Image: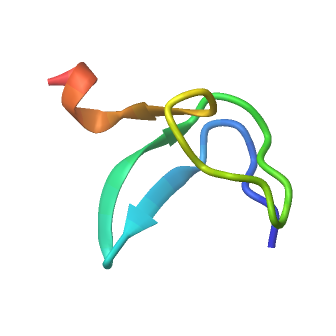
Amino acid sequence: SNISEGDKIYKYGQVIGRAVKDIKIGEHVHLHNLISIRENI
C-alpha cells in the first residue's frame, strides 16, 4: 500500500524513519522522501 506523510518506515522489521511526503507504490524510498530517526535523537 501507499505510505502517507508521517508514517513510520520499516526495514528488516525495525523503524528506520518517517515519511516526509506521501510515497506511492513503486516509488523509491530514500533520503528525499524520508527522515532518518537518527536525526531526531
Q: How many marks?
A: 0
Residue at (32% x, 78% y) in the render = 13
Q: Position of residue 10 (x, y in %)?
A: 42, 64
Q: Quadrant of residue 30?
A: top right
Left or right, 10 with reference to 22: left
Q: Nearer the viewer, residue 22 or 32?
A: 32
Residue at (33% x, 58% y) in the render = 15
Q: Position of residue 37 (x, y in %)?
A: 29, 36
Q: Quadrant of the N terminus?
A: bottom right
Q: How is the image coloured?
A: rainbow
Classify 30 as above or below 40.
below
Residue at (50% x, 31% y) in the render = 31
Left or right, 24 with reference to 5: right
Task: Pick out the residue farthest to the bottom.
Answer: 13
Classify 16 as above or below 35.
below
Q: Position of residue 17 (x, y in %)?
A: 39, 43
Q: Position of residue 39 (x, y in %)?
A: 25, 21
Task: Pick out the residue farthest to the left.
Answer: 41
